[in-house]
Amino acid sequence: MRTALVTAVAGAVVAFLLGLLTFGVQATVHPHDVPLAVVAPPPIAEKVQAADSAEVDIRVVSADEARNLLRDKEVYGVLEIAPGQATIRLNPAVNPSGTQVAQQVLTGVAQGAGLPVRIDARTPTAAERTAPLAASALLWVGGMIAGLLFVVLKGGRLRWLSALTTAVLVTGSTTGLLAWWGVTVNAEALTFLLAVAVSFALLQAGLFKHLGIRAMGILGILYLMAPAVAGQVPELLNPAYKAVLWSWTPFRFSAEGLRSLMYDGSVSTEWWVFGGIALVGLVLLLAGEKAQTDRADGVVDVGVDEADGLPRAERQHTA
């Protein structure tokens, strides 16, 4: 009776936590302070600023400044108002959730001024919108499954070799899928994908080394909750989710970095993030490794051989 009650409570708690960390993110999405830029003559600019609200943060700037802000992804859209015409400019390297909100708001502003609207943007295909987050998740899953099988099949000490091989193969399979979907991956984006795959695989291998199958409790939860957050922009998230999940999840950095590089953009922070993750993975893999040396008196240290479970000294004797 007691066991039945404990397991039932555990199931309910886990379901609640997963719901809180996954579906709760999407259920609480609401725009707040979404940054937008408007280029307009002074009389119209005053009316535009009057349309500012808690949901959006409208900046009235010059044309050059607006394009620089859009290029640097500091705003999600730009509205340029000229006599008899309004043009909305969007950047495909920006998260599509943000550009969708920007287009809706800026269209409403232009229509409120009685102006026809023209959209100046390269519209990403459905596959291109899906690719950054999908690739990040696939790279994570590939490394996680390989690390788990390495533990189950008792692969021995060559975890680092398994991790690097996994990274190369999973990057290749992911790139093949993207090409099949019609997504073009340039050389810099491909290099970035490989760097992400290596960092993921090394971190996962390090955790499996020290925790064994129990590492799935960490890696599995990260996989379940991170994509729900990484696909959103911070201005759409509940502040609690933004601070607790979005601020650090590696899926966010990989998705944003790949999206930017797909459109010939540039990334900097992302390289440091995944370099740091790879370093942590290497430290975990090397921790506890000690070289076996022959002692001067000819006595060989006794240890368990991972291949067959026999002590090394006994194995040498039987050989």
Image (tube, rainbow, N blue to C red):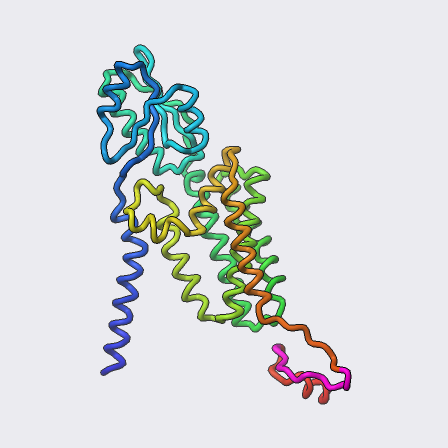
Q: Which residue is found at the position 41% from the left and 57% from the top?
A: 223
Task: Quadrant for the C terminus, please.
Answer: bottom right
Q: Is residue 275 magenta?
A: no
As rendered, which of 17 and 270 lies closer to the eye? 270
Residue 289 position in % (x across, y down): 61, 71
Q: Which residue is found at the position 44% from the left and 61% from the top?
A: 219
Q: Is residue 303 magenta?
A: yes
For this view, does 27 lie left or right of residue 226?
left
Quarter holding residue 314: bottom right
Residue 251 position in % (x across, y down): 44, 50
Residue 164 position in % (x across, y down): 60, 57
As rendered, which of 128 and 43 lies closer to the eye? 43
Quarter holding residue 92: top left
Quarter holding residue 190: top right
Residue lying at the far top in this picture: please name it. 83
For this view, does 83 lie left or right of residue 258?
left
Stretch of the chain drawn in magenta: 296-306
As rendered, which of 267 and 232 lies closer to the eye? 267
Task: Quadrant for the N terminus, please.
Answer: bottom left
As rendered, which of 137 and 179 lies closer to the eye? 137
Q: Which residue is found at the position 62% from the left and 82% from the top?
A: 304
State whether residue 241 is above or below residue 50. Answer: below
